[in-house]
Amino acid sequence: MATVSCRADELVRAAEPLHLHGRAHRGIDPKGGEIIVSGGWFRYQVVVRSERVYIVQITYLGF
């Protein structure tokens, strides 16, 4: 079984050809997503060409 570090390295190697030079990117941006955290979640969007990750929404449930 591969370690978490090895899996992360594999993901980085797979993403490099597509996203290494963000300003040269001509394709569509990857989908954003939601990350669940303790007490809520936040929604984000990745914009490769501008080399940014935007937080679109933060939801706090208060617990």
Image (cartoon, grey):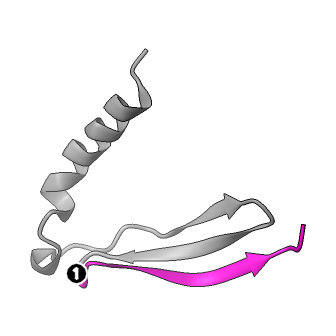
Q: Identity of the amino acid at label 1?
A: Arg
Q: Residue at x 24, y 52 (%)?
A: 15
Residue 59 forms part of the magenta stretch: yes
Q: Residue at x 43, y 32 (%)?
A: 4
6 horizontally vs 1: left or right: left
Q: Residue at x 81, y 65 (%)?
A: 39
Nearest the viewer among 3 and 35 is 3
Magenta region, mostly helix, strand or loop? strand
Q: Which residue is drawn at 13% across and 80% down?
A: 23
- Residue 63 in the image, given as x and y percentages of width and height: 90, 66
| Quadrant of image for the N terminus | top left
26 horizontally vs 44: left or right: left
Residue 54 lies in what quarter of the image? bottom left
Nearest the viewer among 5 and 48 is 5
Considering only vertical position in the picture, is 10 above or below 15? above
- Per the image, label 1 sits on a secondary structure element best described as loop
From which residue to which does the magenta span run? 49-63
Residue 7 forms part of the magenta stretch: no
